[in-house]
Amino acid sequence: MNQVSRALGEFQEMDALAAMDSPIHRLHPLPKLLTTILYIFLTVSFDKYDLAGLMPMVLYPMVLFAVTGIPVRTCFHKLRIVLPLVCAVGILNPFFDRAVLLKIGNLSISGGFVSMVTLMAKGVFCLMASFLLAATTTMDAICMALRSLHVPSMIVTLLLLTYRYVSVMISEVSVMTDAYHLRAPGQKGIHISAWGSFVGQLLLRSMDRAEELYQSMLLRGFRGEFAYARVAPLRFGDAAYFLITAAALLILRFVPLSNLLGGMVI
């Protein structure tokens, strides 16, 4: 199995995760989407030096991981390419902000180091929350929730078609890569001299496949907007989940739990 085939398998694993059964999976997609948006908004609203206040926000994704039964290592494995980019956002802060913010014994910690760790934690927490939304809700259901929030149909349709076509594109790349390796046995990767023709053939095959998909959509009644997903109507439990979770997130944001716990220990 080549790397492209493995990438396709990992992409399809997200659909398998979304098809699991747990209390979170059975919730209506709208409260899950709103909760994720609220969580990301509250997480990024912390001050760049408020690392102690930010740390309790990790409770939300950790509780969801426990309830859904999705291993935390699966999240970090899926996000292994994005995480280094997120963590690199504030990597230069210690060089620009050298003012001493606190001292632990003889160890002086600068404000730049604290702000760097805070930015990294914000990025990781937001990625974890986004992964949990995608791993517990199908893309069709997410698009349906977006339309219920009156997001323009063109944007939502573009998002859904892009998501659906990614797997088709990866599949085409996998077939072409296998065909190339059969014609060049023992060669690692694709030689630079073949890159132009490879990309050109991929473009032509993609255009043909896209035309076939579009004709199939028209035959199935597509007239500019999808019937995204058939889900149960919003229930009392779904609304209760959003209200309780939103209240808990607001408490984590505005109540200094770290200071309270530290005071109790001392």
Image (tube, grey):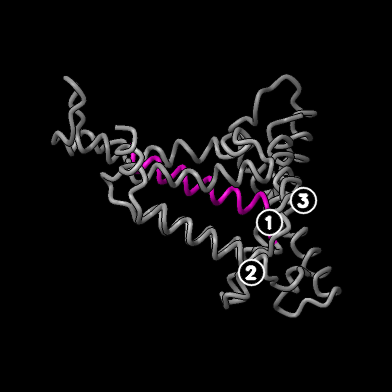
Q: Quadrant of residue 102?
A: top left
Residue 190 position in % (x across, y down): 65, 31
* Residue underneath mark 2: 145
Callout 1 amino acid: Thr
Of the image marks 1 and 3, the number of the one nearer the N terminus: 3
Of the image marks 2 and 3, the number of the one nearer the N terminus: 3
Q: Residues within 10 Å of mark 3 (few under 14, many from 20)?
A: some
Q: Is residue 128 above or below residue 145?
A: above
Q: Is residue 40 above or below residue 71?
A: below
Viewer-proximal residue, 248 or 191? 248
Kindly indicate whether the residue at mark 1 contacts the one at mark 2 (C-beta within 8 angstroms): yes
Quarter of the image for the N terminus: give it.
top right
Magenta stretch mostly in which secondary structure? Answer: helix
Q: Quadrant of residue 75?
A: top right
| 29 sits to left or right of 85 | right
* Residue underneath mark 3: 19
Residues shaded magenta: 117-139
Residue 261 position in % (x across, y down): 36, 40
Per the rendering, the mark at residue 137 is 1
Residue 74 position in % (x across, y down): 63, 36
Quarter of the image for the C terminus: give it.
top left
Q: What's the distance in space between the residues labelled 2 and 3, CA to CA?
A: 17 Å
